[in-house]
Amino acid sequence: MKYLVLSDIHGDRNYLNRVLAEVPDIKNIIFLGDGLSEMLDVKRQNPEYNITAVTGNCDFLKDVPSQEILNINGCRVLVCHGDGYYVKMGLLPIKKACRELKADVALFGHTHRPYYEYDNGLYLFNPGSVTISPATLTTCYGIVDFSGNRPVFEHREIDVLKRD
């Protein structure tokens, strides 16, 4: 079971639409915050998508949680934006929270930088930013495949020079 993992859209519907067009076969989406209104629009316009979304520090909808724990094919997955764990300053707080929550996977955004780490039974994955990141001058997203006995993580960049 593959999941499209997105974060930090920040109003850039052009790149969001390009991502969705690049992976039309993936209907499960995990959104990690900062662009919640765009994701809710996608959900309204495309009821075939199964979207799990959390708020980021730039989202202001109160009826959407800031984090969730999902159970996907035997994996406990912490889904959050990352700002509450100060991920821009380091990953120790989110790792500690995952250990306390007995999570196998942490999916987070906020830094606008793609990231992957495996640490003693814990997978940490940041898909990067759908909008162009000043930090990396890239725009990217993630795919996580939970089909096997361990999750498989992939970062994909969007070609920012390509014209629609």
Image (cartoon, rainbow, N blue to C red):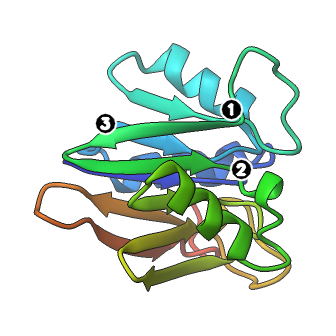
Residue holding disc 2: 9
Q: Quadrant of residue 145?
A: bottom left
Image-based side of 61 in relation to 159, left or right: right
Q: For the residue labelled by badge 3, is the local secondary structure a helix, a strand or a loop? A: loop
Residue holding disc 1: 38
Task: Residue 107: tell me if it is visible.
Answer: no
Q: How many marks?
A: 3
Tag on residue 27? 3
Comes first in the chain, label 3 or label 1: 3
- Residue drawn at (39%, 82%), measured in percent from left and top? 120
- Residue drawn at (52%, 62%), measured in percent from left and top? 99
Dot 3 alpha-carbon crowd within 10 angstroms: few under 14, some 14 to 19, many 20 or more: some
Q: Position of residue 113 (x, y in %)?
A: 69, 77
Image-based side of 151 in relation to 59, left or right: left
Question: Are the residues flagged by discs 1 and 2 in contact, CB closer than 8 Å?
Answer: yes
Spatial CA span between label 3 and label 1:
16 Å
Image-based side of 113 in relation to 5, left or right: right
Q: Nearer the viewer, residue 45 or 81?
A: 81
Q: Position of residue 122 (x, y in %)?
A: 42, 71
Amino acid found under the numbered disc labelled 1: Glu
Rendered position, 120 above or below 97: below
Amino acid found under the numbered disc labelled 2: Ile
Dot 2 alpha-carbon crowd within 10 angstroms: few under 14, some 14 to 19, many 20 or more: many
- Residue drawn at (32%, 39%), measured in percent from left and top? 71
- In the rendered view of the protein, which quadrant contains the C terminus? bottom right
Q: Position of residue 154 (x, y in %)?
A: 37, 74
Amino acid found under the numbered disc labelled 3: Lys
- Residue drawn at (63%, 57%), measured in percent from left and top? 97
Task: Residue 13: tell me if it is visible.
Answer: yes
Comes first in the chain, label 1 or label 2: 2
Image-based side of 50 in relation to 131, left or right: left
